[in-house]
Amino acid sequence: MVTTTRAGWGRAVLAVGLAAALAAGCGGSDGDSAVNSAAPETTAFGGDVSAGEVATGEADTAGSGGGDSGATALAVDTRAIAAARDIVRTGSMQLTVDDAEEASAGITRIATDAGGFVAREEARVRDDEVDITIRVPAGSFEDVRARVGDLGDVEEQTVDAQDVTAQVVDIDSRVASLQRSVERLQGLLSQAGDVGQLATVEGELARRETELEALQGQQRVLADQVALGTLDVHLAEDRPVTLSEDTPGFRDGLHTGWVALVYGGRIALTALGFALPFLVPAALAFAVFRWLHRRRSGPPAPAEPTPQ
């Protein structure tokens, strides 16, 4: 009787623990989001300066009575906040160059010198055009774009900067919450008593691990987009328009007309030769039809004499 009671208590404790882990996995994301949103000042200043230190520094600056010092401190704080943002930078450029292949090699060198790489390159030799995509560190994006523009004449360019800080914070919070939930379920897995409990815990653990892997994939993609800017460049060679020195005259027109007449005659003769096998039987059939029609109609009636 004591053994049965202990087993019942063990199942009850395991069920309570499983329910707590599931509730933590569902509500942990909201809790972590609240924690992260409640401490934006710490992350905004790179993690080395706490919110209390920032407030103390601002109070000291205000108490010193220096207007210029206060403005300088405010500018420094603004730059620090801007530097802590997660920005995805993309751009596209259309350049007219003297040699598309040489300009493409120059863009490759620029990307390599900046610590980036060529993600895609497509050359159309017949059209003297090259499409090339480079990925460079976000901090060097504007410098690289300026150096690429110096390789030719910029016909068109677009630049886009998207702030994804909120998305990064949300994904990081959800990943941390799921990691804790997976750890709790792994602990409960070792305490499962019977087959039913084991299957339940394993199923929930597999679902949480799958969701965690998907979020970690999104986290890696977003981190790559923030770390490296993307620049698409279209290169086209400048083709000068040249006029022919030989202006067509009367002889050229006469020659062109004669050639057209010859070709027209050939086409007419070809059409006649094609239709002749069909015209001969058609003419014979028409002649027979008229002969039969006259024979059935009989001789024509004599004309009545006109009164005088």
Image: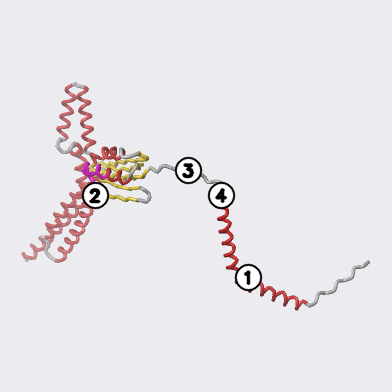
Q: Say few, some or many: other residues with alpha carbon within 10 Å of mark 2 (under 14 / 14 to 19 / 20 or more).
A: few
SS under mark 2: helix
Q: Is residue 81 above or below residue 196?
A: above
Q: Give the amino acid at mark 2.
A: Val
Q: Kindly identify which residue carries mark 1.
A: 279
- Front residue of 308/213: it is 308
Instruction: Determine whether, in the image, residue 6 is placed left or right of residue 109.
Output: left
Magenta highlight range: 107-118
- Name which residue lies at 20% across and 40% down: 38
Q: Kindly identify which residue carries mark 2.
A: 221
- Name which residue lies at 18% across and 28% down: 58
**Discs 3, 2 touching: Cβ within 8 Å:** no
The image quadrant where one finds the C terminus is bottom right
Magenta residue check for 293: no
The CA distance from mark 3 to mark 2 is 59 Å
Place of residue 275 in the rendered image (x, y in percent of width and height, measured from the top left): 60, 68
Q: Give the amino acid at mark 3.
A: Glu
**Discs 1, 3 touching: Cβ within 8 Å:** no
The CA distance from mark 1 to mark 2 is 76 Å
Place of residue 57 in the rendered image (x, y in percent of width and height, measured from the top left): 16, 29
The CA distance from mark 3 to mark 4 is 17 Å
Q: Residue furthest front?
A: 251
The CA distance from mark 1 to mark 3 is 52 Å
The CA distance from mark 2 to mark 4 is 66 Å
**Would you say residue 50 is visible in this rendering?**
yes
- Front residue of 92/227: it is 92
Instruction: Determine whether, in the image, residue 78 is placed left or right of residue 193.
Output: right
If you read the primary sequence from the N terminus, does the residue marked by circle 1 or circle 2 appear first?
A: 2
- Name which residue lies at 85% across and 74% down: 302
Magenta residue check for 112: yes
